Amino acid sequence: MEVTDIEDLIPEEIGGLCGMITPIVGYLLIGISIIANREWFTWADHALSDLGGPAASYPNIFNVGLIVTGVLGLIFALSIYRMVEENIGFLGVSLFSASTVFLILTGLFPTGRAPHFFVSVAFFALAAAGMWVIGLDQLMDVAEPVWGIFLISSVLLTIAAIWLVFSIPYDLGYAIPEFIATTPIMLFSLVWGARLYFV
């Protein structure tokens, strides 16, 4: 399938809308899941994925939330092929699209199932790599390099923030680093979704 065929499958307005609501849906369902499991879940001692594991009171809230967020994210990701110019940009969008598939798989294989660690790490790694590569593509646009600077700097700042968290002399769980890692992904989805929808 050609890139132009993918563009024709998803109208800009639909892709943009999915991009803008992806962070809302994702964070809303994570928040509800945290409230539902507030008796035992702590940011300092757990991973967010524990909210969907066997110890969770209502694991389906978290797991279905990841699946829905991943589906919305995939629709958004496929719609942004039209926003890149070079082959490197197409590669970046492909990597980011793949990350949303692994987010869906993270919901399908929650904590306690064998593939969980692999699919959850693949989600974060592919999303970061995809955003970085898309950022390189956007830097080549001399008219509007600001989008490339936005993407690359957000990935770098996130890596720095996670490194600082792990440098704290306390045996932290993974919830805080995971939340930090989702922030640039959700900002990318929100900002680029708005670009698709309104521009």
Image (spheres, rainbow, N blue to C red):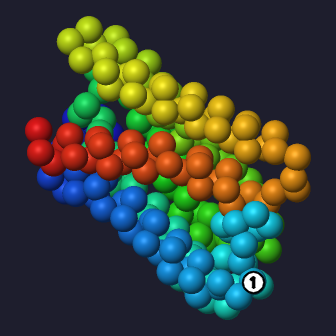
User: Looking at this view, is 111 or 40 the one in front?
Assistant: 40
Horizontal side, residue 11 vs residue 30: left or right: left
Q: Residue furthest left?
A: 199
Position above or below: 136 against 18: above
Horizontal side, residue 117 vs residue 87: left or right: right
Residue at 88 percent of width and 56 percent of height: 171
| Residue where numbered disc 1 is placed | 40
Quarter location, residue 8: top left
For disc 1, the neighbor class at 10 Å (few under 14, some 14 to 19, many from 20) is few
Q: Position of residue 67 (x, y in %)?
A: 49, 69
Q: Position of residue 177 (x, y in %)?
A: 68, 51
Q: Residue furthest front?
A: 169
Quadrant placement of the N terminus:
top left
Q: Secondary structure at mark 1?
A: loop
Quadrant placement of the C terminus:
top left
Specify the amino acid type for callout 1.
Answer: Trp
Residue at 50 percent of width and 80 percent of height: 32
Residue at 81 percent of width and 57 percent of height: 172
Number of numbered callouts drawn? 1
**Residue 3 seen by the camera:** yes
**Residue 115 seen by the camera:** no
Q: Position of residue 140 (x, y in %)?
A: 34, 11
Residue at 49 percent of width and 53 percent of height: 100
Q: Position of residue 113 (x, y in %)?
A: 77, 72
Position above or below: 33 against 84: below
Horizontal side, residue 93 vs residue 47: left or right: left
Quarter location, residue 55: bottom right
Position above or below: 23 against 182: below
User: Looking at this view, is 145 or 176 the one in front?
Assistant: 176
